[in-house]
Image (cartoon, helix red, strand yellow):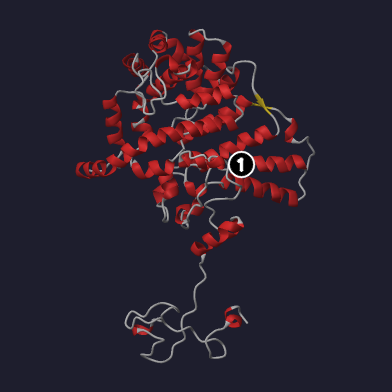
Amino acid sequence: MTERPPPQGEPVRAAEVIGAACLATDLGMGFPFEHGLHATLMTMRLADLLDVDRETESQTYYASLLMYSGCTSDADVAGRTFAGSRTENLTPVQFGSAAEAVAGVIRALPPPGDPLHRRIYEVTRRLVPAARFRKPHFTALCEVAEMMAKRLGMPPAVHGLFAYLTERWDGKGTLKRAKGDEIPLPVRIVHVARDAAYQRVVGGDDHAVDTMRERVGHAFDPVIAGRFVEEAPEIMAAAEAPGSAWEAILAAEPRPWLSLEGEGVDRALAAMGDFSDLVSPHLSGHSAGVAKLAAAAAGVCGFNPSDVALMRRAGFVHDVGRVAIDPRTWQKPAPLTVDEVGAGAPAHLSRGACPAALPAPRLVGRGGLRAPRAARRLRVPPPGVGGLAHPGCAPPRHRRRLSRHARTAPVPPRAPTGAGGRGSRRGGARRAPGLRDGRSGHRGRRAAGPSGRAPGRADRAGG
């Protein structure tokens, strides 16, 4: 194996790591490929037309790439509440009027394609849980995005922006943390550009311009949204630039470029792994556990320190693509259907129970902080904690709990004692030991051991 210097000595541009995280959020949201990159190019063109200072431009760049980094927060709860697509029904109206928001929620509640009477029933059944879901969800979304930005190496001026991620210019945001000029300027720019970019996906350029015009002075800063309407062709052309969107997004990063080294790279990749694990509470800590196991295996196999570090980093991000699978698939406590497997679910889950069949240990944030559940899960639980399918993979304090649900060894049937006796049932079917007899209400006797008596410890242990 070729020797090379340890990765700790190789600086990595923060834009590369954050750009990769942006691609992962596109998967989690169900956006078109590279949508976040194209939207950020539009964001930077709008910031340039507004002639903002260099610091604001830099904050706008990173905030735009990470705007949806909290999209997997409480995905398990959302999957139980909304049977339809939140991306198609809720995202376009996130900054719309109250009537548009309610209509989007109603469309997202019932399963798509159901008959009218069934849709009415599902809306009625799910509407109250959806109303209760909204505020905790927005709180978790902001907190998870803030923690992701912090762990990805962003300075405090950047990760502090995400507390205002869902605010509106008119102060009618769900969390009501700020309004008007109280919302940081980078966030106001990102709101306009990212919403316009998705409106283009929904209905084209003209629809995006009309929507921005309707939201001027309501959800969006009138100066920024007005400038977008005036310069829309030039701004939207930034997303259609020839060549690679990846190269364009790296070139658009304002100087001085931020870089990560050594443990900073590990923390950033671990954050991406935790982001993918958030898609289900039963996967909490999975990526960190894989990274630790892969690094240990590489060390046992005699890999040099550089390759051990690479194996650990690969373990952190080995399954980032899982966010592209509907969270309801991960939550399904039963074998998957052919359609679910064809949609991209791993084949090994189709042959057995999903992780939802096992309990996930409760993870409490450090320092007694009581953040929303999804935010607490992101506070890096110890590697290997949470939702592991085999009790031997869990830490000792969790093995006993998991083993109760993972016992699969069959219990030997009770030896027969003659026709019609207590050791047999009608039709010759034998009762498993320890089960109650449905006719007498008494517990059955234990099967006889090799010596003809009830089995002792030596008999049960195989001699």
Say which quadrant the N terminus sits in.
top right
Residue 311 placement: quadrant: top right
Asked whether residue 217 is in view, the answer is: yes
Residue at coordinates 45% horizontally, 39% vertically from top-left?
Answer: 372
Residue at coordinates 38% horizontally, 90% vertically from top-left?
Answer: 421
Say which quadrant the C terminus sits in.
bottom right
Compared with 286, 270 (above or below) is above
Residue 159, percent across and down? Answer: 54, 26
SS category of the residue bearing label 1: helix
Residue at coordinates 71% horizontally, 33% vertically from top-left?
Answer: 262
Badge 1 crowding class, 10 Å Cα cut-off, few under 14, some 14 to 19, many 20 or more, is many
Compared with 388, 202 (above or below) is above
Residue 68, percent across and down? Answer: 47, 30
Identify which residue, 124 or 5, lies in the foreground. 124
User: What's the residue type where badge 1 is placed?
Assistant: Phe
Identify which residue, 444 or 409, lies in the foreground. 444
The outermost residue toward the left is 117
Q: Is residue 240 left or right of residue 318?
A: left
Q: Is residue 111 left or right of residue 406?
A: left
Task: Determine which residue is flagged by label 1.
Answer: 316
Compared with 439, 258 (above or below) is above
The outermost residue toward the right is 3
Identify which residue, 233 or 231, lies in the foreground. 231
Q: Is residue 341 left or right of residue 219?
A: right
Asked whether residue 320 is in view, the answer is: no
Residue at coordinates 39% horizontally, 28% vertically from top-left?
Answer: 175
Residue 233, percent across and down? Answer: 42, 11
Residue 254, percent across and down? Answer: 60, 16
Identify which residue, 229 or 182, lies in the foreground. 182
Q: Is residue 182 left or right of residue 388?
A: left
